[in-house]
Image (cartoon, rainbow, N blue to C red):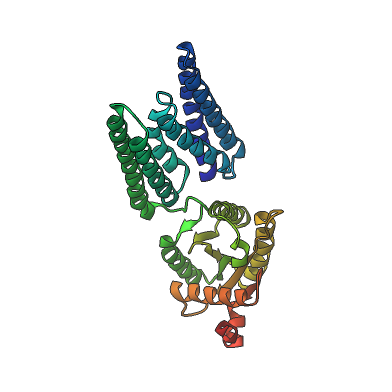
């Protein structure tokens, strides 16, 4: 199961469970003839259930966030309206807003949303909410906010601690950059010992392909690119995520001519796998083949120089480092 599939599955289960709780709340309110509360809880349960189904249906693709936006806006409007006009309905739901925001959005966006909501909540409590519960709601909200932030902080710390231990990048399933030099050094030693060829490719998504792509779209493209590489490389080939949209591919037992053919195949496959009706996504590649005296650092540098040369020619290009040497690197000056 891919990371995207796992994420969608977990979100689907979380939304479905929350929908059941909201439905029980609606039923309880209806039994006591609290029709306004029952209606609000029923709508909330419906939104949660729909979002769970949406995440479940998308499988390998990131689920769109428009329905998640609706849930956040619904909670904000309902909780603030309960304090201003309809006390006793859903003002206590304000406690879950920070948790939902950090569940749905990236940490930067969630921080902005939560900060703006906290200010609006404080103003609503001070200006409109009447009764001794005002202070209680405010401090319980602060407690729930602090607990949400604590969970987020612990999650981020855990991510940072585990990151160096991961062999593969979660999004693309490529090996991480930390292992590249070590693995390439082993391949160089094997090639020199056995007298076999070794080539590497530096691959990058062309920048014009991502100009109008959102952060989620970029993640989706990277996930599909990683899957395409996994499906179109040999079992003993390996690929590494070098930078954000840059990859290094090791091709043991592969000479310059064979590596050029493989680079051409990957360019075609990438365009087919990554492009949609709305956007055309292409990649460019640089190729370098092992020569006497090469080290992991020089071999990577040669491939990336060839990649820069290729990108200067335009999108969807590839270049062998031999062309860069014969050209004297003049094109790189541009």
Q: Is residue 221 left or right of residue 190?
A: right
- Figure quadrant of residue 266: bottom right
In this view, 33 is above or below 185: above
Does residue 97 lie above or below 153 as drawn?
Answer: above
Q: Which of 98/296 is in front? A: 98
Can residue 86 be seen? yes
| Pick the front one: 217 or 99 | 99
Vertical side of 245 occupied by 59: above or below = above
User: Would you say residue 295 is visible in this rendering?
Assistant: no
Residue 11, position as x, y percentages in the image: 50, 36
Task: Report the number of discs.
Answer: 0
Measuring from the top left, give residue 329's x and y in whole percent. 57, 85
Residue located farthest toward the right when viewing the structure as drawn: 277
Residue 39 pos. (x, y %) = 52, 22
Seen at 69% across and 54% down, the residue is 276
Give the position of the C terminus as an image quadrant.
bottom right
* Quadrant of the rendered image containing residue 32: top left
Left of 105 or right of it: where is 273?
A: right
Judge left or right: residue 60 versus residue 189.
right
Residue 331, position as x, y percentages in the image: 60, 84
Considering only vertical position in the picture, is 323 above or below 168? below
Write the residue at 54% across / 73% down.
303
Residue for point 28% across, 26% down = 132
């Amino acid at each position: 199961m891919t990371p995207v599939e796992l994420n969608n599955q977990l979100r689907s289960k979380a939304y479905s469970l929350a929908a059941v709780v909201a439905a029980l709340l609606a039923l309880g309110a209806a039994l006591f003839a609290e029709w306004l509360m029952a209606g609000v809880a029923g709508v909330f349960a419906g939104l949660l259930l729909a979002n769970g189904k949406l995440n479940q249906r998308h499988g390998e693709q990131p689920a769109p966030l428009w329905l998640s936006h609706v849930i956040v806006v619904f909670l904000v409007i309902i909780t603030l309206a309960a304090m201003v006009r309809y006390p006793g309905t859903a003002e206590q739901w304000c406690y879950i807003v920070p948790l939902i925001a950090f569940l749905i959005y990236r940490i930067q966006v969630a921080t902005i949303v939560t900060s703006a909501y906290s200010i609006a909540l404080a103003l609503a409590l001070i200006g409109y909410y009447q009764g001794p519960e005002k202070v209680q709601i405010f401090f319980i909200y602060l407690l729930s906010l602090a607990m949400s932030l604590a969970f987020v902080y612990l999650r981020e710390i855990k991510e940072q601690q585990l990151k160096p231990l991961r062999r593969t990048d979660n999004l693309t399933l490529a090996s991480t950059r930390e292992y590249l030099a070590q693995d390439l050094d082993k391949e160089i030693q094997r090639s020199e010992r056995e007298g076999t060829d070794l080539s590497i490719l530096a691959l990058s998504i062309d920048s014009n392909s991502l100009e109008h792509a959102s952060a989620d779209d970029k993640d989706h493209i990277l996930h599909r690119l990683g899957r395409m590489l996994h499906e179109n490389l040999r079992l003993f080939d390996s690929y590494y995520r070098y930078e954000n949209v840059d990859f290094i591919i090791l091709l043991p037992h592969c000479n310059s001519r064979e590596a050029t053919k493989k680079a051409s195949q990957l360019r075609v496959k990438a365009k087919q796998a990554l492009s949609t009706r709305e956007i055309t996504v292409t990649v460019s590649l640089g190729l370098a083949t092992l020569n006497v005296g090469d080290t992991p650092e020089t071999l990577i540098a040669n491939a990336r120089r060839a990649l820069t040369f290729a990108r200067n020619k335009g999108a969807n290009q590839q270049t062998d480092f031999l062309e860069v040497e014969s050209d004297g690197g003049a094109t790189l000056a541009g």
